[in-house]
Amino acid sequence: KICSVHSNQEVLMGSSFTIYCIFKKNCDKLIYQDEMVLSDSSGNSTVAINIVNLTRTTTFTCKCVNEPEPCGADIVPGYPPAVPRNLTCIQEGEYGKVICTWKTGRETHIKTTSHLWLVMIPFSRVQGEPSVRYESVPVHDGTHSAAFPVSGSEHNFSVWVQARNSLNSANSTVLSFTLNEIVKPLIPKITKVECSSRQCRLYPNNTQNVQHVEIRYGEKQDSWSTVSLNVHTQNMNSTTHWTIPSLHPYSTYTFE
């Protein structure tokens, strides 16, 4: 190319800075900001352009009048990442992955990465394993999520989030926990119902770590009764079931 443009590709929103066009030969020069001519000159091989208060993505182009091929750069204004906040983690069931979510803060308008960092410390040791980085995915506007697998519960976990772009980086506060503190029981699903004249037995799956359940039942969709059960009192047998008493014979019930 006949020339080259020197500038940061990403700059702070509203900032003022200088772009340099460096030409490889003497020629009559034209400098454009989008479609507008900023300057023309035929002197030095280096042309400096002072830009003030850039607030939108802008294309800067340099060219020789008699040369068809220009050089240029797209300059994108944006913001450094905000400090990630509201970091929370849950484990979906006793054997599930740990899922962490957090708020990313305001839109940066430039490419910004957000990673979850993890350190695991076995209960029997003082020093943890080396920190491990996990990619995040956007969940919805302003919220990101990352997940990591676990094997065994005999660990302390420390996690934090690092957001980074070309303008700066920011770290969240560290969140420390054990799996017992964050495990969330899976929602049991009723897989079979056995009824006699005045009671029904409900057979569920996904009962790991469930201590209490609340079951709604009714003959009509707009008329419900509720019963709360302590799972441990009904979980002595190998097959878990929940008994709903005091039902009306010759009736059809819905359970949830």
Image (cartoon, rainbow, N blue to C red):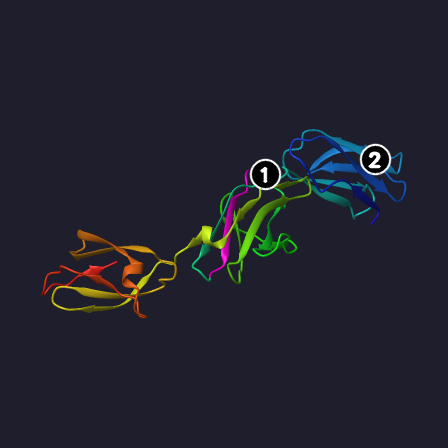
SS label for mark 1: loop
Residue extending farthest front? 124
Q: Is residue 212 left or right of residue 122?
A: left
Residue range of the region highlighted in magenta in the rendering = 96-106
Q: CA distance from mark 1 to mark 2?
A: 39 Å
Q: Is residue 119 left or right of residue 90?
A: right
Q: In which quarter of the view is residue 57 placed?
A: top right
- From the image, which quarter does the C terminus lie in? bottom left
Q: Residue 8 location in percent, x, y? A: 74, 40
| Residue at mark 1 | 83
Q: Is residue 7 above or below residue 113?
A: above
Residue at 10% across / 61% down in the picture? Answer: 248
Answer with left or right where residue 64 lies relative to residue 82: right
Residue 68 pos. (x, y %) = 79, 48
Residue 50, quarter of the rendered image = top right
Residue 149 placement (x, y as % from top left): 53, 60
> What is the x, y in percent for residue 184?
41, 54
The amino acid pointed to by label 1 is Val
Q: Quadrant of residue 204?
A: bottom left
Based on the picture, tell me whether residue 100 belongs to the magenta stretch: yes
Instruction: Give the residue drawn at x 50%, y 55%.
Output: 98
- Residue located 30% across and 64% down the image: 235
